[in-house]
Image (cartoon, rainbow, N blue to C red):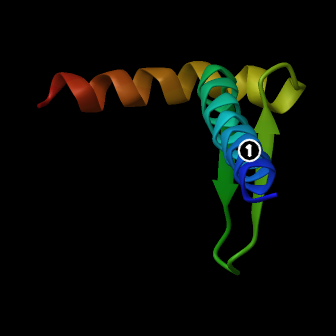
Amino acid sequence: MKRRALGVFGFVTGLAAGSVLYRRTVARRRERVDVYYDDGSMISYDDGSAEAASMLPIARDALAAGRARR
């Protein structure tokens, strides 16, 4: 009984860890633009949207300029 419970616990733990690693990997590959407003609200535009298409090149240039100054 204890061995089976330990096996189930190990499986669930491995599944949770795999899920976290998968989400972190996928999230890094997708670009998005987060726009923050003075009232504390925020909107996020995913890559592929019309809004993001106009803002992502500007954001890439800004990030590249910031990295070049280091």
Q: Quadrant of the N terminus?
A: bottom right
Q: Residue at x 24, y 27 (%)?
A: 67
Residue 23, by quadrant, is top right
- Horizontally, residue 35 falls left or right of residue 67, namely right
Image vertical order of residue 18 relative to residue 16, above or below: above
Q: Position of residue 11 (x, y in %)?
A: 75, 41
- Horizontally, residue 38 falls left or right of residue 4, namely left
Answer few, some or many: residues within 10 Å of disc 1's Cα (few below 14, many 20 plus, some between 14 and 19). few
Q: How many marks?
A: 1
Q: Nearer the viewer, residue 23 or 34?
A: 23
Q: Position of residue 38 (x, y in %)?
A: 64, 75
Q: Residue at x 74, y 44 (%)?
A: 7
The residue tagged with tag 1: helix, strand or loop?
A: helix
Tag 1: amino acid: Gly
Residue 50, by quadrant, is top right
Label 1 sits on residue: 7
Q: Residue at x 67, y 39 (%)?
A: 14
Q: Nearer the viewer, residue 33 or 10?
A: 10
Q: Nearer the viewer, residue 58 or 12?
A: 12
Q: Residue at x 70, y 52 (%)?
A: 6
- Horizontally, residue 4 falls left or right of residue 59, namely right
Q: Residue furthest right?
A: 49
Residue 52, by quadrant, is top right
